[in-house]
C-alpha cells in the first residue's frame, strides 16, 4: 500500500499539471472483478477553462486518467474469456490507464508489458497495476518491445495515422486483438471480427451512442514465427 500511495501521489501531481482542480478517484467496474483504476473525478471541470489550463490540456492531455469504452469492453472480454491470455506473454499497445493489460494479468497472463510513448500514461499504468494487485513491465518505444504471444490495441485508432500500428504489431505477436468503437471496418482482411459489446468511457464524457458499440477483431501475427 505504501508503494501505491507514493505512485498515486505521483500521478495525481501529473494530472494536476494539466488540470489543477482535478483529482483521482479509485474506480471499480462491473464485469471486471479485481480491476481498480485511479481515474479523474467524475465532476471535473470541463469548461470554460482558463486559457493557461486549456493550453496545458492541448499540449499534454491526460487521456490516461479515463477508462475509455473500448478498453473497458476489451477488459471485460478478456476476463470472461481468459483462455485468450492465460499463461501467455501480453503486450498492451497504447496502454493509457493500463486497463487492458491489467485485465490480461487478472485473467492469468504470465507476463504483461504496458507500452506507451507518454511517460504519464506509463506512470498511470504502473500505479493502477499496483492498485489492482498485478505486475506490469513498462516499455516506452514499440519498436523496442519484445516479441510476445498476444498484443492488445484498445482505443488507439481514433487517429487514422495510427493504422500502421496494426502491421507493426503483427510482427511482434502471434495474435493481435484490436478493440475500437470509432472504427467500423479495419480494412485489413487479416482481421476477423470476434466480439461486439457495449461500453462507455468512465467517467462518462457524454459520448454519442454510436461510440458505445465496441468491436473486437483478431488477427494472426508473425511474431515468434507464427503462421
Image (spheres, rainbow, N blue to C red):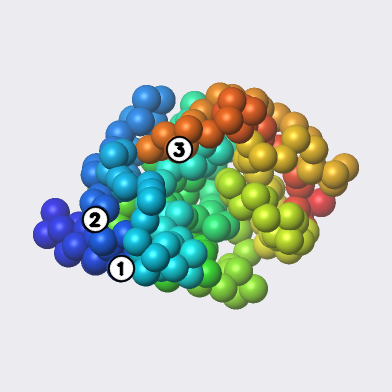
Q: Residue at 66% across / 44% down in the picture?
A: 178
Residue where numbered disc 3 is placed? 205
Q: Considering only vertical position in the picture, is 212 above or below 120?
A: above
Which quadrant does the N terminus fall into? bottom left
Q: Are marks 3 and 2 in contact (CB under 8 Å)?
A: no
Residue where numbered disc 1 is placed? 17
**Kind of element beneath mark 1:** helix
Give the crowd class for mark 2: few <14, some 14-19, many >=20 residues within 10 Å.
few
Please give the label number shown on residue 21.
2
Q: How far is mark 3 from mark 2, CA to CA? A: 17 Å
Q: Residue at 67% across / 51% down in the picture?
A: 157
Please give the label number shown on residue 225.
none
**Kind of element beneath mark 2:** loop
Horizontal relation, residue 150 to residue 48: left or right = right
**Kind of element beneath mark 3:** loop
Q: How far is mark 3 from mark 1, CA to CA? A: 21 Å
Residue 17 image position (x, y, % from top left): 30, 68
Give the crowd class for mark 1: few <14, some 14-19, many >=20 residues within 10 Å.
some
Horizontal relation, residue 33 to residue 54: left or right = left
Along the polypeptide, which appears first: circle 3 or circle 1? 1
Residue 202 image position (x, y, % from top left): 40, 37
Amino acid at each position: 500500500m505504501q508503494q501505491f500511495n507514493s505512485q498515486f501521489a505521483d500521478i495525481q501531481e501529473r494530472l494536476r499539471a494539466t488540470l489543477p482542480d482535478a483529482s483521482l478517484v479509485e474506480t471499480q467496474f462491473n464485469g471486471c472483478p479485481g480491476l481498480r483504476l485511479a481515474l479523474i473525478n467524475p465532476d471535473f471541470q470541463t469548461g470554460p477553462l482558463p486559457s493557461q489550463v486549456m493550453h496545458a490540456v492541448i499540449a499534454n492531455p491526460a487521456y490516461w486518467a479515463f477508462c475509455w469504452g473500448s478498453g473497458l469492453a476489451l477488459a471485460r472480454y478478456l476476463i470472461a474469456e481468459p483462455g485468450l491470455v492465460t499463461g501467455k506473454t501480453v503486450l498492451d499497445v497504447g496502454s493509457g490507464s493500463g486497463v487492458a493489460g491489467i485485465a490480461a494479468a487478472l485473467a492469468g497472463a504470465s507476463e504483461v508489458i504496458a507500452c506507451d510513448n507518454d511517460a504519464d500514461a506509463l506512470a498511470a499504468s504502473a500505479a493502477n497495476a499496483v492498485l489492482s494487485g498485478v505486475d506490469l513491465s513498462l516499455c516506452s518505444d514499440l519498436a523496442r518491445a519484445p516479441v510476445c504471444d498476444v498484443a492488445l490495441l484498445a482505443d488507439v485508432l481514433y487517429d487514422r495515422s495510427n493504422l500502421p500500428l496494426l502491421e507493426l504489431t503483427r510482427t511482434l505477436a502471434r495474435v493481435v486483438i484490436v478493440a475500437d468503437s470509432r472504427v467500423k471496418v479495419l480494412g485489413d482482411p487479416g482481421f476477423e471480427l470476434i466480439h461486439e459489446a457495449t461500453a462507455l468511457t468512465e467517467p462518462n464524457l457524454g459520448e454519442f451512442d454510436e461510440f458505445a458499440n465496441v468491436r473486437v477483431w483478431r488477427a494472426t501475427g508473425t511474431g515468434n514465427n507464427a503462421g
